[in-house]
Amino acid sequence: MAILQDLTEALAKDVLDAQDELGDDRFYEKVSKILLDASPTTQEAFMTAVRVILAERRARKFLEGSLKAKRTGAAAPMAPRDSVGH
């Protein structure tokens, strides 16, 4: 359902922006609980959007840090190791 994805993506973006402003790195969990009480389907779509946005932010930070290091001659950031040691 397109409306579900559109609404939850917009809400996730707004909540994460508010979270940054509030200085509460778990604010999205509070909103998630409200959604869960009203609609588990909406809550799951919201949490998926939150996870995607947070993952993109982390990846972008790593990308930008890597490029900055290359351009300035600094040490590149370390990529996290996965659970099997790669």
Image (cartoon, rainbow, N blue to C red):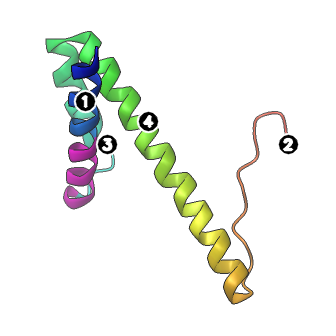
Q: Which residues are magenta?
A: 13-22
| Residue type, label 2 | His
How packed is label 3: few (under 14 Cα within 10 Å), some, or many (20 or more)? few
Q: Are marks 2 and 1 in contact (CB under 8 Å)?
A: no
| Tag 1 residue | 6
Asked if residue 10 is positioned above or below residue 46 in the image, the reply reads below
Q: Amino acid at mark 3?
A: Arg
Residues 73 and 1: in front is: 1
Whole-angstrom CA distance, mark 2 to mark 3, is 30 Å
Queried whether the magenta region covers residue 21, the answer comes back as yes
Mark 2 or mark 1: name the one nearer the start of the chain: 1
- Tell me what residue is drawn at x 14 percent, y 13 percent: 38
> Do residues under tags 2 and 3 come within 8 Å of each other at their CB atoms?
no
Circle nearer the N terminus (2, 4): 4
Image coordinates of residue 68 in percent, x first then y, are 62, 78
- The answer for how far apart the CA atoms under marks 3 and 4 are is 12 Å
**Of helix, strand and loop, which one carries label 2?**
loop
Q: CA distance from mark 1 to mark 3?
A: 22 Å
